[in-house]
Amino acid sequence: MNGLSLLLGIAVLLVIALAWFAAYYWLNPHVASPDGKARVVGTCGDVMEISLKFREDRVAEGSSWTNGCAHSFNCVCAAVDMAKGKTAEEILDITGLRIQEAVGGLPRDHWHCAGLAAETLHAAVDNYMQASPGVAQKRGKQR
C-alpha cells in the first residue's frame, strides 16, 4: 500500500503542475516574433513586459506580463488592449492617466502602475520604430 500511495501522490503533484503550467500560458498569451517589445523595471521593483505585432502599420496582436500586483496586471493589460488597432503615433498618446481611466481608477499609492504600463508600451513602440526604418522615416515626414 505504501508504494501505491507514493505513486498516487506523484500523480496528483504531476496533475497540479500541469494544470498550473496550462493556466499560466492561457492567462499569459505570447506574441510569436513581435515587431516591438520592451521590458521595464519600475522604481517599485515591478517588472512589466509588452510585445506588439504590427500589420499594415497598426497593432494586430499584443501580449503583456508583469510580476507586480493586481493593479500592475490590470494596467499592463489595459495598455495592450488600448494599443490594439492603433498606429505607433496614436499609441504614443496613451498616457498613464488614460490607463488609470481605462481600469476604472487606482488608489493613489498605485498611480505609478499606470505610469509604468504607459512607459513600457512606449518603449515597445520605440523598439518597433527603431527596428522598422520605414516607420521612423514616415513619422519624421508627418511632423
Image (cartoon, rainbow, N blue to C red):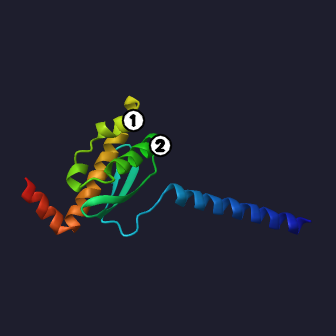
Find residue 93 and report its image quarter: top left
Q: Nearer the viewer, residue 58 or 13?
A: 58
Q: Which mark is residue 69?
A: 2
Residue drawn at point x = 29 percent, y = 36 percent: 97
Residue 143 at x, y = what percent?
Answer: 7, 53
> Where is 44 relative to 23, above or below?
above
Q: Quadrant of the N terminus?
A: bottom right
Residue 5 at x, y = what percent?
Answer: 85, 63
Residue 66 at x, y = what percent?
Answer: 43, 51
Q: Nearer the viewer, residue 49 or 136?
A: 136
The number of numbered badges drawn on the structure is 2
Q: Secondary structure at mark 1?
A: helix
- Residue type of the residue flagged with mark 1: His
Would residue 24 appear left or right of 15 to someone viewing this image?
A: left
In the rendered image, which residue does mark 1 sit on?
Answer: 110
Q: Please say if the residues under marks 2 and 1 sit with CB atoms less than 8 Å apart.
A: yes
Is residue 125 visible to the viewer in this orientation of the structure?
Answer: yes
Is residue 45 visible to the viewer in this orientation of the structure?
Answer: no
- Residue type of the residue flagged with mark 2: Cys
> Where is 131 relative to 71, above or below?
below
Q: Secondary structure at mark 2?
A: loop
Find residue 38 and report its image quarter: bottom left
Residue 8 at x, y = what percent?
Answer: 81, 64
The furthest residue to the right: 1
Find residue 59 and report its image quarter: bottom left
